[in-house]
Amino acid sequence: MSQTANQCRFTGRIRNVRHLATLIKSVHYKDVAMCKISQEGLAFELEESRCLVARCLMNTQLFDDFKYTPPTAELVQRPEPSQHASFSIYNSQQGSQQISQQIAPQPQFEHRFPSGYNSDGSVLFGVNLATLLNCLNMFGTAGGIGSSTNHGDGSTGGTGFASAPVTAIKLTYDGIGCPFNLTLEDDGVVTTCGIPTFDPEPPVYFDFDPESSSRIVMKAKWLEEGLRDLDATSDRVVFRFSPEIPHFRISSLGTIETLDVNYSQGDVLQSFNYSYDHPIEISYNFSHVLHVLRACGCADLVNISIDNKDFMRIQFLTPLFEHKVAYSEYNFAPLEALG
């Protein structure tokens, strides 16, 4: 089988294009993104200056139909270094002599996916999110994120999933170098868009350790209001965790004044797990952190975690339909540790 023929195949169907558009908009702080298709679902990742990584995942349960077939893994020989064996020969006149002889190693084989695919068979390619969102909104039904209000029954206000017109979508991808194809159907009218793809950038991985992290859970709207109350002209924001009240504080350090927003368990925080017996304060790039406002508007809950290396992860849970939820997250590298 030739490499061009040995490609992945992906087909996915979603009953409401707005579900996918809302999830993408929650991380759309720049246009260039990496798209990953795997057995887990459809994911998008964006990176900024190797200090910020945002991800969102449309898992398979959110699709009405999801089929991903990876390429066939090929049996290839592992490159093995040459081996040497040494042994001694005794000569009555010259004594013992050490002799080294090169030995051809036994060939070792392993299954590998074709070039361009990950070791698990998933595929990664670049895509322009602005182009993708424009195509998703071809019929004007992808909507905006808006402001979401949870009503306690799994439904949300602001996103308008229940009352807005519905456009169904089919997504297909036929392997590396192929376009990302969308077929949208609205009230019997069908249109198809082919979005160009490009070679992906090497992914950025933060060595975030969830086992060592301190974390809080609260309503996303409380984080949104707190960030909007800070001085947006500040170049950094400080996150403070403490075993004492207030348990959580975010502060903007401006040239004229410092603004604080305090949160405490039982008041606003729904859950608080802290790993230390003393407060910690870590600063992050404020312009990077403000990107999470894109997700706050449609999310219900937010989980803020900081590990023992001061990396921060902010995860959002967004209700979509029939008690199904989608996840997005932002990962931040620290500027400096203050305490």
Image (spheres, rainbow, N blue to C red):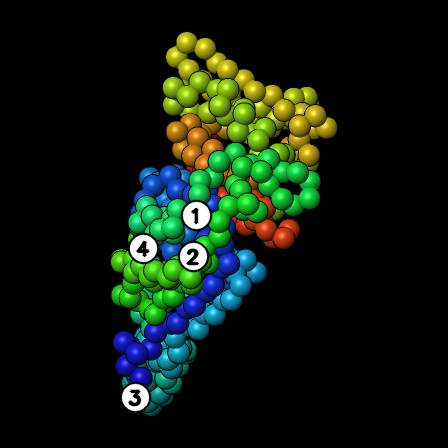
| Of labels 2 and 4, the one closer to you | 2
The CA span between labels 4 and 3 is 71 Å
Residue flagged by tag 3: what amino acid is it? Gln
Corner quadrant of residue 28: top left
Tag 4, which secondary structure? strand
Few, some or many C-alpha atoms within 10 Å of disc 1 (few <14, some 14-19, many ≥20)?
Answer: some
Circles 1 and 4: CB distance less than 8 Å?
no
Residue that badge 2 annotates: 186
Residue 214 location in percent, x, y?
61, 37
Q: Residue furthest top?
A: 256
Residue 64 location in percent, x, y?
53, 63
Q: Which mark is residue 126?
A: 4
The CA span between labels 3 and 1 is 95 Å
Residue at left offset 39%, top offset 29%: 287
Residue flagged by tag 1: what amino acid is it? Thr
- Relative to residue 305, is residue 142 depicted above or below? below
Residue that badge 3 annotates: 93
| Of labels 1 and 4, the one closer to you | 1
| Of labels 3 and 2, the one closer to you | 2
| Of labels 4 and 3, the one closer to you | 4
